[in-house]
Amino acid sequence: MADQFECTCELGQARIREAEAVPELFHRYRERLLRMIALRLDSRIVSKVDCEDVLQDAFMEAVRRIQDYLDRPAVPVFIWLRQITIQILIDTHRRYLGAKMRDVKQEVPLGWEGYSGANSTLLARQLADSLTSPSQVVVREETIDELRTALEQLARIDRETLVLRHLEELSNNEVAHVLGIDKYAASKRYLRALKRLRLTMLKEE
């Protein structure tokens, strides 16, 4: 209900001041979108592509498509902006990497594969922070190594679910929209991914 209420309010504001709607919405969600871009930008083109430029291209595309969204708001505004930004990022990767880029159709939305292990390390650190205290430095570093190894053995959809929740910091409802499933299925998928991660770590011991 919260997502629906937020979406309804934002749409009401957008219809009143359509010319200002997209700038206001991008300002509101700027940091979340930049975090997602930085996380998913292929390390091979980091020196060539500025995250702000990707966001600017996404902004221009959102301006072009705002009326279509207002006419048929199928998802909350943030998810719509994220979808546009993801598509711009996919196009950017294709432009710079060409044949070197993995087949996007085989990836769980633009994500885990081909990012030089950076995501697995970031995610492992995020998860380790919730398992150990700052005083347990040695234990924490060992846990990070174990988590990174276990993460690399998970199915792509399980890794993507954990990335969405722990690195992009999406809510359960937002994850459901991104994956195209209902919120109960998203919650079960997340808990199942954590369980599989724990089981994989136990097998490694």
Image: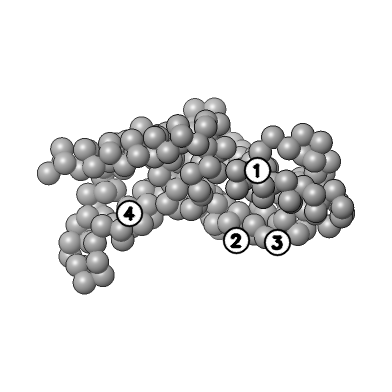
177 up-or-down from 24: above or below: above
Q: Earlier in the sequence, mark 4 or mark 2?
A: 2
Q: Which residue is mark 4?
A: 127
In the displayed structure, does residue 49 sit left or right of residue 15?
left
Identify residue type, mark 3: His
Q: Earlier in the sequence, mark 1 or mark 2?
A: 1
Which numbered marker is on residue 31? 2
Q: Please tell me which of labels 1 and 4 falls first in the chain.
A: 1
Looking at the image, residue 51 sits to the left or right of residue 115; the answer is right
Q: On the image, numbered disc 3 is attached to which residue?
A: 27
Of mark 3 and mark 1, the one earlier in the sequence is 1
Is 97 rendered above or below residue 33? above
Is residue 112 or residue 65 the one in the foreground? 65
Give above or below for 152 relative to 14. Answer: above
Q: Secondary structure at mark 2?
A: helix
The C terminus lies in quadrant: top left
Q: Can residue 48 be seen by looking at this rendering?
A: no
Residue in the image at 29% along x and 48% along y: 148
Asked if the residue under mark 4 is in contact with the one under mark 3, i.e. CB atoms within 8 Å, the reply is: no
Tell me the CA gap for discs 1 and 2: 22 Å
